[in-house]
């Protein structure tokens, strides 16, 4: 009798609502997961870029995408192997079939050549168009100089950075 009462309470306490099951279903799980990622890409023996991320999730359905839920840092190198520029964000997603990568949440672009640090809300990289841009307000810091702008545009190697409608105190040397 005691065993049947315990069995009744055990079965009655279990709940299998569809919402709980859906959260753990295979369709919501990544096809691949990589932790503490450190990826380097080179061409003809010269380092081009380096990617660091605490976690990378790859999905193949319904759309092929790569998600960086804990953020990522991407460094671009010059021909001498020195870091030329870097992009860092707390969250990023890459839509692989569309060649588009978006980063958001505290995006920081550092141009080590010119000493500029650019702070953005988000940034979009369209690799097939050789374009990196943002249509949201930006702040640029170079030493004591701080300027603001309404957007940001560059080539994908971040060699030609341009802040849209830049304003602030800018000193010119004659």
Image (cartoon, rainbow, N blue to C red):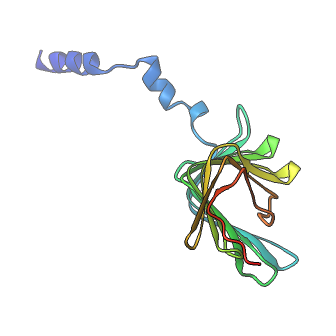
Q: Residue at x 81, y 41 (%)?
A: 98
Q: Quadrant of residue 1?
A: top left
Left or right of 136 in this view: 77: right
**Residue 154, how many percent across, how many down?**
78, 57
Q: Residue at x 49, y 32 (%)?
A: 24
Please give the count of numbered marks on the rendered protein.
0
The answer to whether residue 87 is visible is: yes
Between 79 and 93, the one lying in front of the other is 79
Q: Looking at the figure, which quarter contains the C terminus?
A: bottom right
Left or right of 92 in this view: 125: right
Left or right of 38 in this view: 162: right
Q: Quadrant of residue 155?
A: bottom right
Q: Residue at x 87, y 49 (%)?
A: 129
Left or right of 46 in this view: 144: left
User: Residue placed farthest to the left in the image?
Assistant: 2
**Residue 3, how many percent across, how many down?**
16, 21
């Amino acid at each position: 009798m005691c065993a049947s009462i315990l069995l009744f309470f055990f079965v009655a306490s279990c709940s299998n609502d569809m919402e709980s099951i859906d959260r753990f279903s295979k369709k919501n799980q990544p096809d691949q997961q990589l932790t503490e990622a450190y990826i380097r890409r080179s061409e003809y023996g010269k380092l081009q870029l380096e990617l660091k991320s605490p976690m990378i999730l790859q999905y193949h359905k319904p759309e092929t995408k790569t998600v960086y839920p804990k953020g990522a840092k991407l460094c671009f190198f010059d021909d001498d192997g020195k870091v030329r520029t870097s992009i860092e964000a707390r969250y990023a997603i890459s839509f692989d079939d569309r060649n588009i990568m978006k980063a958001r949440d505290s995006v920081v672009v550092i141009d080590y050549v010119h000493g500029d640090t650019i702070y953005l809300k988000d940034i979009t990289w369209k690799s097939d168009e050789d374009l990196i841009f943002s249509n949201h307000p930006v702040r640029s810091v170079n030493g004591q100089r701080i300027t603001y702008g309404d957007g940001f545009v560059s080539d994908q190697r971040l060699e030609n950075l341009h802040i849209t409608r830049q304003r602030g105190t800018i000193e010119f040397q004659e």
